[in-house]
Image (cartoon, rainbow, N blue to C red):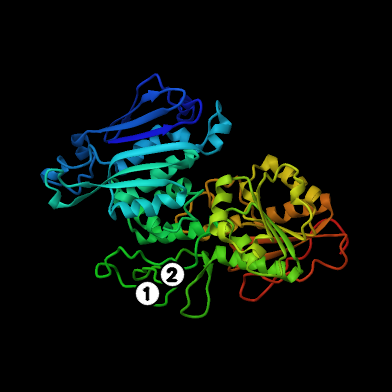
Amino acid sequence: MLLTISTTVRPATDLGFLLHKHPDRIQEFGQSCGVARVLYPEAGEERCTAALMLDVDPIRLVRSRDRSTPDYTLGQYVNDRPYAASSLLAVALADVFRTARTGRCDSRPELAAGPIPLEITLPVLPCKGGPELAHRLFEPLGWRVEATALPLDEEFPEWGDSRYVRLVLRGEVRLADALNQLYVLLPVLDDAKHYWVAPDEVDKLIRAGESWLAAHPARDLITRRYLGRRRALTRTAFARLAEIGDDVEEDLEPPAEEDPAAAPAIAPGGNGAPGEVLPAGDAPPGGEGQAGPAGAARRPLNTLRLEAVLATLEGLGASTVIDLGCGSGRLVGALLERPRFTRVAGVDVSSQALALAARRLKLDRMPERRRERLELFQGALTYTDARFAGYDAAVLMEVVEHVDPPRLDALERVVFGAARPGHVIVTTPNAEHNVRYEFLSGMRHPDHRFEWTRAEFHAWAAKVCGEYGYRVEFLPVGDDDHEVGPPTQMALFGLASAAGGLGSAGGSAGPEGPASAGSAGGGDD
């Protein structure tokens, strides 16, 4: 198996720093199925190419199989695994480029943090779905895709094409993102894995796809194929994606490629997502959404969270809003749909997130009158920025938990001290509710620096109020479990110096309307 990664960034040999592999050496890495080697066919100032070669030992691969499922056919020794990219190559890539996938490079931190010109080539790639599927999966990620079907036999063109393609990807992409995309999408294209799909595969998928999967238009197909169509794991992954990002659609239809005759019965009106496959006795992971009327599907938590924030902003009478940490722009888009919000801004530290937001919002063809109400820009919430000021309300929706605890003071100073909007809405996971999520171990997202209990969130809010002259009310989002509380907790801050109270704080996502936990911290009531 062969994978090459080329760049023309100057100097191109900096690719060695980003991959943590020296261009002057051939390095070997033992794998369960053989040996992976990294070498550089070319390493110049203008162009540098790194090659990952996986030499598969079919005998070792056979001996590593589960002996409870013996295979006596010749096909276990004679097959396409030595030369066709598959999950074997994805696992080797994850192992060999482990540090590069994190985006860490102490020698070239700025280069590792931003997009660089890349060309990735896979000479032989099994692709169940043909070249069209390769375009469908990679083009939304910003790649220019060249996928060429390989003939069964060049001497007999009448035999038609094989299931393999030659894939070339070109574009300006952050190297860590490119590696993580390949790690997920190689087995998705092959629609097969050489190892048992265990529950920890959900964590691997979320970790590798954290910056792009939630917004991908083919995320349901990707998730199902990556998890080997294991329904329980797939439902858990959908719930996790709805938890960690605000970009998962409410309706996740089963992929059209699946054979309806072979599929289990579709629940006509159960508790799963519309059209979700539910085996007998199965139920969706607890707490993933809000149950509606009898027979209706549960509503994803990210939808409830968005609705709660919008209703609260409308109840406050805010007309200018800034979304601090806007991600791919779901809240920004919802605000623009409501004419009452005359000025809307979205800010994020990630240039890729802003690019996704521009694509989601169709910025290139947005009507001029709507475009005049919108501002998207890059910025860090831990550094004072004059562009953050001048808004009626600011929203930090699922943002604070991504900030290192030592940097929280800086965020508080920037948002509550310098920008100082009339109101601030903060939503964050309720750590106590995590016990309601099946298969979840640890935090809900690999990038979370912490997750607060309700008491911890209230204590933090009281501290902010005392230092910056705000008052606060607390509202549940999602089912308010009588034992562990709601899945998401929301705090509505208002300047204590403003006349009257915090205003109408409607929009609680619970079934009984807003529920305030009272006020905390500084200022007079």
Residue 54 position in % (x across, y down): 29, 33
**Mark with earlier residue (2, 1):** 1
CB-based contact (under 8 Å), mark 2 and mark 1 = yes
Residue 319 position in % (x across, y down): 75, 65
- Using the rendered image of the protein, determine whether residue 208 is visible from the camera's viewpoint: yes
Instruction: Find the residue positioned furthest to the bottom.
Output: 294
Residue plotted at (20% across, 38% down):
63
Q: Secondary structure at mark 1?
A: loop
Foreground of the two, 406 or 90: 90
What distance separates the C-alpha of mark 2 from that of mark 1? 8 Å
> Is residue 154 shown left or right of residue 233?
left
Residue highlighted by disc 1: 267
Residue plotted at (77% across, 45% down):
413
- Using the rendered image of the protein, determine whether residue 246 is visible from the camera's viewpoint: no
Q: Secondary structure at mark 2?
A: loop
Quadrant of the rendered image containing residue 317 = bottom right
Residue 243 position in % (x across, y down): 54, 58
Quadrant of the rendered image containing residue 40 = top left
Quadrant of the rendered image containing residue 372 = bottom right
Residue 87 position in % (x across, y down): 31, 44
Whether residue 44 is situated above or below residue 225 in the rendered picture: above
Q: Name the image quarter holding the C terminus.
A: bottom right
Foreground of the two, 323 or 95: 323
Residue plotted at (63% across, 60% down):
332
> Is residue 339 shown left or right of residue 212?
right
Under mark 1, the amino acid is Ala
> Is residue 336 shown left or right of residue 85?
right
Foreground of the two, 321 or 497: 321
Foreground of the two, 498 or 389: 389
Which disc is residue 272 wearing? Answer: 2
Under mark 2, the amino acid is Gly
Whether residue 485 is situated above or below residue 33 in the rendered picture: below
